[in-house]
Image: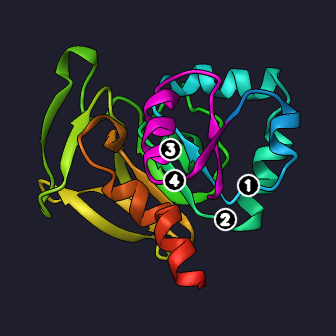
Amino acid sequence: MARIGILAVQGAFAPHAQVLRSLGHEPVLLRAPEHLEGPLAGMVFPGGESSVQIDLVARLGLEPGIRAVLDAGVPVLATCAGLILLARDVDADSAHRQWSFGAVDLAVVRNGWGRQVDSFEDASEQGRPLIFIRAPRIVRVGPAVEIVDRYRGEPVLVRAGAIMAATFHPELSEGDGLHREVFGAAAASASAAQ
């Protein structure tokens, strides 16, 4: 059983916790600096409202601990607003450029797939279920970032080292495929260790 931290200040953190539990992991809801003190085997940045999440990360003093987790190179899954929190450039061509952790060499536009009323479900080019809710659009991918999946020719799932980042909400679809790919299953990890 691995301890996987989930940024739990706002947004869709509860469904991620359910998926991680189903894989045999221990989700740790990160709401205070002391929650980041124990060793974490991975971290989830959930969807939600990125500007609210950024504000709460700063007000609650979570930034140093989160940076330490990112610097440790543990597996990370970032979904929707979580991808925005990790992108290097957010709304760079806008007067309202947003701060981020800058951990993934991407440029994104918030609500790039539409506003709340434009939310939709479809399948990716690889047949992966996609749920877009005010989803960011990736407009630039850095040279060290791998495009893992696309929708209508555009990147929607990318990997940069140990970080997997999605513009959609895999935690809201049936199945645990993306979480399993990033964090594995505790039972499988225990079997491999024997």
Say which of 112 and 58 sits in front: 58
First in sequence, mark 1 or 4: give its number: 4
Query: Are dots 1 and 2 in contact, CB under 8 Å?
Result: yes
- Real-space Cα separation, disc 1 to disc 4, in angstroms: 15 Å
Which image quarter is the C terminus in? Answer: bottom right
- Real-space Cα separation, disc 4 to disc 3, in angstroms: 5 Å
Packing grade of label 3 (10 A; few <14, some 14-19, many >=20) is: some
In the image, residue 2 lies in the stretch drawn in magenta: yes
Residue stretch rendered in magenta on the structure: 1-28
- Residue 21 is marked as 3
| Helix, strand or loop under label 1 | loop
- Amino acid carrying label 4: it is Gly
Q: Position of residue 61 (x, y in %)?
A: 85, 29
- Label 2: which residue? 74
Mark in the foreground, 2 or 3: 3
- Label 1: which residue? 40
- Amino acid carrying label 3: it is Arg
Q: Please give the name of the residue rendered at 76% of the width and 65% of the height, measured from the top-left corner.
A: 72
First in sequence, mark 1 or 2: give its number: 1
Q: Please give the name of the residue rendered at 62% of the width and 58% of the height, measured from the top-left corner.
A: 1
- Amino acid carrying label 1: it is Leu
